[in-house]
Image (spheres, rainbow, N blue to C red):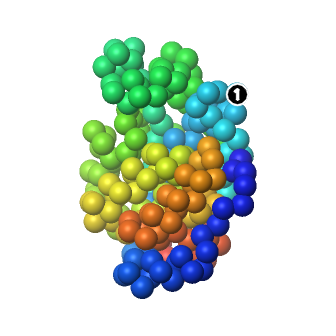
Amino acid sequence: MLEGNCTMSEELRLEYQRKGFLHAVGFGETPALLVVDFSLGFTDPTCPLGANFATELAQTCRLLERFRVRKLPIVFTTVAYDPEDLERLRFIAKIPSLRLLEKSLGYWQLNPVLGRLESEKLILKKQPSAFFETDLLEWLRSRGVDTLIVCGVTTSGCIRASVIDALQNNYRVIIPRECVGDRAIGPHQANLLDMDSKYGDVLDLEAVLQRFQHISR
């Protein structure tokens, strides 16, 4: 869905590294997969909030398959509003199109291509971060998770907010670059760089999948 050819130059990476950024935190022993906001509202190009994330969805499904085979923790989030939220929340005042995620309209529901199972946790959230006023932290701690692999949309919005909160709660964070997307290439590339520099490891999906060969569970 992204257009253009905006890539981070090797010179820029070297400059960040000289300043002490871009150090890898790596994987722990117990990963969980966090799939952020791949809802109909965000993945339907005809919706004002949406764009074509077919490629990102397909790549995320590869990770979902690997997690399901290993019976590792999976959690999905979606933004969903009650009618009383529509006039109360500043987030909606800033982005009026978010009104489309009011529950009666159905856009909050996950894209069916994900094939979410009843046993897989679903968090309905009202703010960008998957952690804000949800039970995600408690759920992760109860399962002994030490590494959070984050997929979904948008890179500059709910992905970034969730990644920062995950780091602040002392999790190792992995962002597979093919599994996150944004509405435009500029915000996408800039936020991948920023997250890789400060908050987690941005890796190719193949490198993430390769890691599963070393997970005993």
- Across and down, in percent, residue 36 comes to 49, 46
User: What residue appears at the point 35 percent right and 57 percent down from the top-left corner?
Assistant: 164
What's the amino acid at mark 1?
Thr
Whether residue 67 appears in this view of the structure is: no
Near-viewer residue (11 or 36): 11
Q: Nearer the viewer, residue 216 or 184?
A: 184
Q: Residue at x 72, y 55 (%)?
A: 4
Residue 158 coordinates in the image, percent (x, y): 45, 45
Residue 190 appears in the rendering: yes
**Residue at the spot x=49%, y=50% of the render?**
156
Count how many numbered circles sit on residues in the image: 1
Q: Residue at x 52, y 24 (%)?
A: 97
| Left or right relative to 198: residue 61 | right
Rendering quarter of residue 166: bottom left
Residue 90 appears left or right of 217: left
Q: Is residue 120 left or right of residue 9?
A: left
Q: Element at badge 1?
A: loop
Q: Position of residue 73 (x, y in %)?
A: 45, 57
Tell me if residue 20 comes above or below residue 41 in the rendering.
below
44 in relation to 67, above or below: above
106 to 25, vertically: above or below? above
| Place of residue 131 in the rendered image (x, y in percent of width and height, measured from the top left) | 33, 47
In this view, 39 is above or below 14: above
* 55 sits to left or right of 98: right
Q: Is disc 1 surrounded by few (<14), some (14 to 19) or many (20+) residues within 10 Å?
A: few
Q: Which residue is mark 1?
A: 46
